[in-house]
Amino acid sequence: MSRPDEERFLELVTADPTVRAVLDRAPALGLDDWWLTAGALFQTVWNGLTGRAPGTGIRDADFFYFDPDTSWAAEDAVIRAGAELFADLPVPVEIRNEARVHLWYERKFGVPAAPFRDCADAIDHFAAVCCCYGIRVDDAGAVEVYAPHGYDDLFALVVRPNPRLAPRHVYEAKAARWAGEWPELTVLPWPDQPSR
């Protein structure tokens, strides 16, 4: 993974006003392990690469944090604080404690999930390789990037399955929506044998 690729990625995503606002405000929540992830990032890059207006096709901004307190009350308190903090943004900021995902994932998606170790572990399990990004600001205000698969697929507009957790139907539904919004994408098929 090259430094110029990371710089290009950051230039594209931080030019989006919603991304910038989340990064600027998120430290006020007082969370340790937090990341802005997924569509707010990779779809922002697609918009930049294809000349679309910021925010095109982006339904929400996923905000992950990791807190060993897996009670609904603790997560709900953070969700409520975030709803107030981000209320004026053009898309909802969906806040989730990744320490709780294994408690509801099977009910929602039909397959069990092992508990995640941290937010990076959760990002590693996104349905497509092009989704596996996270950014946050550190205590000094510097932007930190998590990009476990690098940037090749993202910059080439390739959607490749990442069958670590999400079932095939989840990947295919997401990929179909994305291809409808960004027809320049190349969507690769789900593999016959999942890689683990």
Image (cartoon, helix red, strand yellow):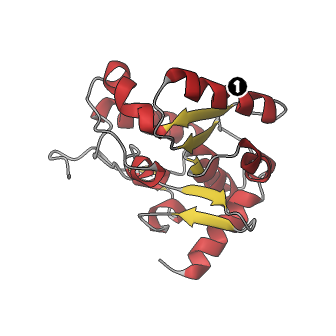
Q: Left or right of 58: which side holds 22?
A: right
In this view, the residue in front, 33 or 127, is 33
The residue that label 1 is drawn on is 80
* Residue 68: percent from left, percent from top: 46, 39
Q: Is residue 141 above or below residue 42?
A: below
Q: Is residue 3 above or below residue 16?
A: below
Q: Amino acid at mark 1?
A: Arg
Q: Quadrant of residue 83?
A: top right
Q: Residue furthest top?
A: 107
Query: Total label count?
Result: 1
Q: Left or right of 125: which side holds 3?
A: right
| Residue 86 visible in the current orientation | no
* Residue 35: percent from left, percent from top: 59, 50
* Residue 63: percent from left, percent from top: 60, 41
Q: Residue at x 35, y 31 (%)?
A: 102
Q: Residue at x 57, y 75 (%)?
A: 5
In this view, the residue in front, 172 or 108, is 108
Q: Residue furthest right?
A: 88
Judging from the image, what secondary structure is the residue with disc 1 in?
helix
* Residue 33: percent from left, percent from top: 56, 51
Q: Residue at x 60, y 80 (%)?
A: 4
In this view, the residue in front, 104 or 130, is 104
Q: Left or right of 127: which side holds 167?
A: left
| Residue 102 visible in the current orientation | yes
Q: Residue at x 61, y 57 (%)?
A: 135
- Mark 1: give few (<14), some (14-19) or many (20+) Cα within 10 Å: few
